[in-house]
Amino acid sequence: MDTLEDVTEPVSPSGRFFNTQLLCAYVFGFLESEVPIDFSQANYLFQHVFLPINPRFSSIMVRDEEGEMKWKRVEVKPEDQIKVPTFPENESLEFYDQYFDDYVSMLLMERTPQDKPLWEIHVIKYPTSNAAGTLIFKLHHALGDGYSLVGALLSCLQRADDPSLPLSFPSRKPSASSPSSKKGFFLGFSPFSNMFSFFNSIKDFGWSIVKSSIVEDDKSPIRSGEEGVESLPCVLWNISFSLDEVKTIKSKLGVTINDVITGAIFYGIRLYMQEIDNKAGKANSTGLVMLSTRNIGSYQSIQEMMKPDSKSPWGNHISFLHVPIPKLSQASLSNPLEFVWKAQKLIKRKRSSFTVFLIEWLLDMELKLRGHEAVAKHIYGTLRNSSVVVSNLIGPMEPMVLANHPVKGLYFTMSGGPESINIAIMSYTRTLRITLKTQKGFIDEKKFKFCIMKAFDVISKAAMEIAIKIKS
């Protein structure tokens, strides 16, 4: 990158290591419209709604005379940032579904130009079987993490029933009968100071270092182990579950929503592995759970995020945990709720430790001692050595609108990592959406989807047949 003057602010350390030759990561937000998209309002939204969210949206990353990376404000041209692809006209929904899927697969692989702001909006004006039109927000991870970027998108939206009221979000508290913490697994932790937690934290921290640098998961039907997976074609697809049904299972079992979903996903993964290779159910496989280290459970306004003393500051405030995927056993096959119990036990123990903050500290020390390229290599190795990457964000409970366009669906994914499977979970109104980005030609999407849905169904049926039960 050329040396330029008149720079604005330094690029954060995480902004640098998420934008390297080895690791170039993006967050994608998908907004499905119930009505055809009226493109005439795009320039207004661009100039008066989206750009003012954060100065980084009108900046590029440059290197100053001392070699330090800075954000430089530039003039942003709508034609450079807003893309409107052209598909053949008057075709069937099935035809547009395929065109949409192919277009998204292409987007997931491409890198944005470094001489323009690190984001794009893609306007899909053609209908699919899911929506009358779709907006795709492609946002570089250097701009912020999923919490920041999805929070920014939500700031552009309003409640459909009453725009003057703020959006509200599901409670992250477990059932009253649950012994779990009142914090959600993916976004909140409540470390407590005792010897058991201390030793667990040290053990998990040590294992995380080993997993990131030395020990790889077994090659299996969910992990190809190929070099450069991040550059290979991928497929994006969704599974939707009723949030009411998930809450019913949660109440029946006395666990959290995350316990239910994690258990169903892990069980479905093992069913898929056994379906592809009968011996693969015993493979050592790890789920890498991406976490926000913010001590807050819901989104804050952009104004709050930008304050110096904010509890949920803008930027990248993430860490990760290695969670072993339980292996299939005769007990779990005869009683699928065992996977939920195992998920709850693992989550409860991980939540009680402070491993996630030790990992954040390790990355910070590595950055100071070895530089952002070394941190990028560490994160890349962590992703590569795991089998599945999992992330989770909560969405609003009320239907939303964007410039008189009712929002039918909302989901997200991430790209740039070398994993064969990336799973992103998000709620919106009464639907819980699981979005899977999978390595094309390696993962059988139809079988994988069938196994996840089967796992959820058998867990749901088993939960309905028992009385409320707490198992610690």
Image: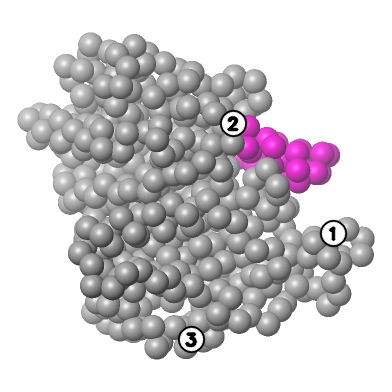
Q: Nearer the viewer, residue 262 or 174?
A: 262
Residue located at (21% from left, 45% from top): 246
Mark closest to the chain's N terminus, 2 or 1: 1
Query: Which amino acid is tagged 3?
Result: Asn
Question: What type of secondary structure mainly makes up the magenta span?
Answer: helix
Q: Is residue 385 magenta?
A: no
Disc 3 to disc 2: CB gap under 8 Å? no
Q: Nearer the viewer, residue 83 or 11?
A: 83
Residue located at (50% from left, 36% from top): 419
* Disc sitting over residue 227 in the figure: 2
Q: Is residue 374 magenta?
A: yes
The x and y percentages for residue 323 are 46, 29
Check the image and report above or below for 267 versus 235. Answer: above
- Is residue 161 left or right of 117 when viewed as pictured? left
Residue at the outermost left position? 465
Magenta span? 356-381
C-alpha distance separating marks 3 and 2: 41 Å
The x and y percentages for residue 183 are 41, 46
* Disc sitting over residue 68 in the figure: 1
- Is residue 223 left or right of 365 when viewed as pictured? left
Residue located at (32% from left, 69% from top): 88
Check the image and report above or below for 10 versus 384. Answer: below
Query: Which amino acid is tagged 2?
Result: Glu
The answer to which quarter of the image holds residue 258 is top left
**Which secondary structure lies at badge 3?**
helix
**Which secondary structure lies at badge 2?**
loop
In the picture of the structure, the residue carrying the numbered disc 3 is: 43
The answer to which quarter of the image holds residue 436 is top left
